[in-house]
Amino acid sequence: MESLITLRRELHKYPELSGEESETSQKVIHELEKCDPSQIIKNVGGDGIVAIFNPSENEADKTILFRAELDGLPIHEATEADHQSVHQGKMHACGHDGHMAILIGLARELQKKRPDRVRVLLLFQPAEETGKGALKILEDKKFKELIIDHGYALHNLPGFDENTLYIRSDSFASASVGVDISIKGESSHAAYPEQGMNPSNVIAGIIQKINDEFEDFSKSHSGSKYAVTYIKMGEKAFGTSPGEAAMGLTFRSETDEMLKKCLDWVENLVKNEADSFSGSITTSRVEPFAATINSSEGCDIVKNAAKEMDVEVEELERAFPWSEDFGRFGEKFPITLFGLGSGNDSAPLHSEKYDFNDSLLPTGVRIFKAIIDCYS
C-alpha cells in the first residue's frame, strides 16, 4: 500500500480541472500499462480511459464496470501537506485522487489474478465536477460499443465513521441543476433613476417570492432544496443606475422527476415577475446532474462483499443532497454508488483544508475486489 499512497499523493500534487485532465490521464495510463490489461481505450469522452481485464480463460458471463474521476476543483489549497497542490487555485478537494488510486490498486490485483468468468472495466472519467463528463462518455462511439451489465463506484464521506460503508437502495445522491437568470433593463444617471430600468427590484422580488413559497412547495416535494449561488449587478460606481443583472440558483431533489417539478415551478415564478417588468428576463439551465438511483441487486452485492471483508455497513434513510455525475450512467446500465466514511474529524468535501484519508485505499480495493468475487 505504500506505493499506492505515494501515487495518490502524486496525483493530489498535480490536479487538473474538468475538461483539462490530459496530464492526469497520461499518469493513469502509465500506471495501468504496468498492470497488463487486455486493452486500454484512450480519449473516451475527452481524456477518459477504459482499461479492460478479460477473464483468465473462459468466456465472460458478466461485464462489470468500476468508475473513478480524473478532475480536481478550482480551489486554492490550504492543507500545508507535503503533497499540497503545486497549481495555484486548483486542488483535489473531493478525493478524486484517492478514487483513482483505488482503481489502480484494483488493476494491480487483477494483474495478479483475473476472475474466471467476469470481464472487468475500469473507467477513469473526466469532468465529473461539472456534470458534463458522463454524458460525453455515453455519447462516445468507443464506449457505446461496450456491453455492461452493472457499474459500481464509491465516494469518500468526510464526517462519517472511518472505513464504514454507507449505502442506500433507490435514490443515493440527488439530481441537481443550476438556473441562470439574466435581466435586461436600461441604465441611467444615478441622479435620474426613473429614466432607466434598474433590475434590483426584480432580483429582490424573485428571491423574496422563492423564499416565501418554497417551504410550502417542498412539503409535497420532500428532499428538495435550493440556494442562491450568485448575484451580479453594476460596478462599484455611484453615478450610474445599472440596467443589467444576473443571478444564479441551484435546485436539488432526490429524483429527476421531482427536480423537473422544481424547475417548472421556479421558471413559472420568474415568468410572472417578467410580466410586470418592462425589460426582459430570460432563464437557462446549466450543469445538470441526474439523480443517482441505485440498483437494489447491486446494493445487495455490495453489502455481501462488505460482509465477506468484515467491513461495517450502514443503510442511509435519505439520499444525499449533493449530486454525482455517475447517476447519468444509469441510463445505459444498472449502477450502484456507495460511500466510504473518511472519519468524523476529516475536513469537508470542497474545502481548502480537505485531504483524502489514505487509510481508505486498502478498504476500497478490497471491497471492489470482493464485488468481482461475488460475480465469479
Image: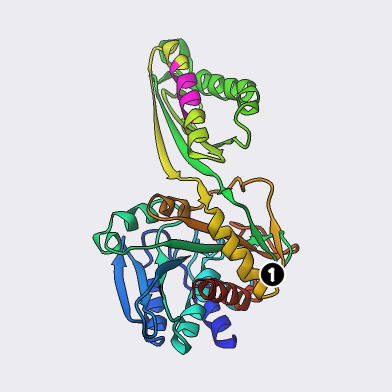
Residue at image coords 39%, 71%: 61
User: In this orientation, which residue lies closer to the viewer: 350 or 342?
Assistant: 342
Question: Can residue 310 be seen?
Answer: yes
User: In this orientation, which residue lies closer to the viewer: 121 or 211?
Assistant: 121
Q: How many marks?
A: 1
Tell me the kind of residue under disc 1.
Asn
Question: Can residue 355 be seen?
Answer: no
Lateral position of residue 166 relative to residue 104, left or right: right
Residue at image coords 38%, 66%: 21
| Magenta region includes residue 35 | no
Across and down, in percent, residue 224 comes to 59, 35
Q: Residues within 10 Å of mark 1 (few under 14, many from 20)?
A: many
In the figure, residue 197 lies in which quadrant? top left
**Circle 1 is placed at which residue position?**
163
Range of magenta residues: 263-271
In the figure, residue 243 lies in which quadrant? top left
